[in-house]
Amino acid sequence: MKIAVVGGGASGIIAAISAARKGADVTILERCDRIGRKILATGNGRCNYTNINASIKNYHGKNIDFIKAAAKKFWVSDTISFFKEIGMLTKVEDNGKAYPYSLQASAVLDVLRFELQNLQINIKTNFEVKTIEKKDSRFLIGSYSCEQEYADKVILSTGGKASPALGSNGSGYEIAKKLGLRITDLFPALVQIKTETNFVKALKGIKIDAKVTAAADNLSETSIGEVLFCDYGLSGPAVFNVSRFCAVNKNVKIKLDLLPEIDYNNLHKILIKRKSKNISLENYFIGMLNKKIGIVLMKYANVLPLTRRSDTLDFDEITRLCIAIKAFTLNVTGTMSWNNAQVTAGGIITDQIDPESFECKKIKGFYITGELLDIDGDCGGFNLQWAWSSGYIAGLHCASENNNA
Ligand SMILES: Cc1cc2nc3c(=O)[nH]c(=O)nc-3n(C[C@H](O)[C@H](O)[C@H](O)COP(=O)(O)OP(=O)(O)OC[C@H]3O[C@@H](n4cnc5c(N)ncnc54)[C@H](O)[C@@H]3O)c2cc1C
């Protein structure tokens, strides 16, 4: 049986491996001049390839239950075993984030490439698929440069629209649309957030740990972790995790709790006590917060001038400073673009796909994996886990003659 895997990214590569292990004749068709480019850029070059705490709660999409079947068939421990078997050991760091033991993303791609070679999987690079048509019982695959390929079955693994420079330019959605598949609206996710800039600009380059809450109307989403101040707004993993919320809702406000370990009442007491140090307001937060953040907080809370002595602070001003620390609030003006995003929120609507096999319900022999589907994960290894799970299962099922994988 001849299987074409369209897209040589994370989900396509593992799909090709699991199909070839079942004896199928597999060809990967990849638009770039090499496969797996995005893998090299993941996890800041270290590839946070899964997360040992991954659960359904880490995912988003219209129908999250869709992932339950995959989570039973091929999940985190299966992924770690898969990589161990092909030669890669794993290191687990904070919050369950798993990396290759060498902390090099290239190790992930290398061991996958070795396995592709062992299994004699064909790879056609610079082959950008434009159309896929079902002709009788086979698929005719056409490229932008008018090349053609035939296959008995096809796995569409072209990724989403995020970071097109790394290969995934959204063309998979066009292919799916031409085949009559329905797609949700698409938004950049795990991306930097643009905010009003009058306060953040002065903090450019400062990293802190904070509790980040994005809120609009009666809805909100919260994440705790690293935040990086930028001249256009905010970045960092905790910000990425609420960026999906900012993309899909209107009039969003971001609230930062800059000292999440200390509750409001205790903070109030600490600030009252600190008054007696009788230092200038410019230095009031030194030892508690980054000095520049302290100065911005004074301006934000309108507790000025900075040359004033701290023993002149009154109860109301201390309250305003507490609120500034616990709820430093910024209006969101948007998110950064697809060029900066790590993943796509939205995608091919999953009620058209069999969750047990990733086969398209109305096009037999046609499978869809990874980020193309309306499933996206939080920051921390969850998106690659989805790519491995969906790809592995699709490849296995696709190559099983009786399709009972
Ligand atoms: C900078 C960055 C860092 C990230 N870090 C992490 C991380 O540490 N952990 C994590 O879990 N996730 C991370 N992600 C997200 C993760 O990489 C993706 O969710 C995952 O790679 C999606 O896998 P995929 O197989 O669906 O698509 P992709 O990996 O995007 O692969 C799609 C492939 O298809 C090819 N292609 C596209 N269109 C065509 C076409 N028409 N014809 C032929 N080939 C085509 C592309 O060139 C590409 O090779 C990161 C993403 C980015 C951009």
Image (spheres, rainbow, N blue to C red):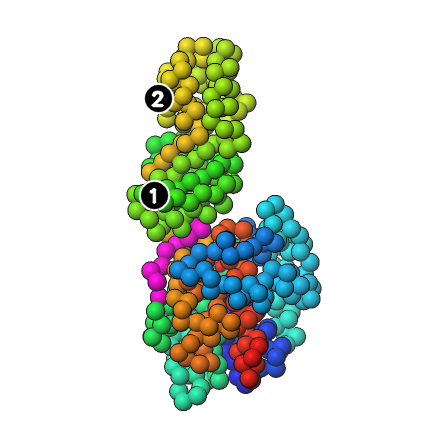
Q: Is residue 204 at least partly visible in the picture? A: no
Nearest the viewer among 148 and 152 is: 152
Query: 10 Å neighbourhood of mark 2: few (<14), some, or many (≥20)?
Result: few
At horizontal 55% and vertical 84% (from top left) the residue drawn is 402
Q: Which residue is mark 1?
A: 218
| Lower sequence index among marks 2 and 1 | 1
Q: Quadrant of residue 214?
A: top left
Which numbered tag is attached to residue 302? 2
Nearest the viewer among 86 and 107 is: 86
Q: As displayed, is residue 154 above or below residue 187?
A: below
Q: Where's residue 66, x and y in %?
A: 47, 64
Q: Where's residue 155, x and y in %?
A: 48, 75
- Residue 185 colored magenta? yes
- Residue 246 colored magenta? no
Amino acid under disc 1: Asn
Q: Is mark 1 within 8 Å of ligand 1?
A: no
Q: Quadrant of residue 183?
A: bottom left
Task: Write down the region rendered in magenta.
Answer: 183-192
Q: Main secondary structure of the magenta part?
A: loop
Q: Where's residue 269, x and y in %?
A: 49, 19
Q: Where's residue 213, x and y in %?
A: 42, 40
Judging from the image, what secondary structure is the residue with disc 1 in?
Answer: loop
> Looking at the image, how many numbered discs can be counted on the residues?
2
At horizontal 44% and vertical 81% (from top left) the residue drawn is 364
Amino acid under disc 2: Asn
At horizontal 43% and vertical 49% (from top left) the residue drawn is 191
At horizontal 42% and vertical 53% (from top left) the residue drawn is 189
In the rendered view of the protein, which quadrant contains the N terminus? bottom right
Q: As displayed, is residue 313 above or below residue 249?
A: above
Judging from the image, what secondary structure is the residue with disc 2 in?
Answer: loop
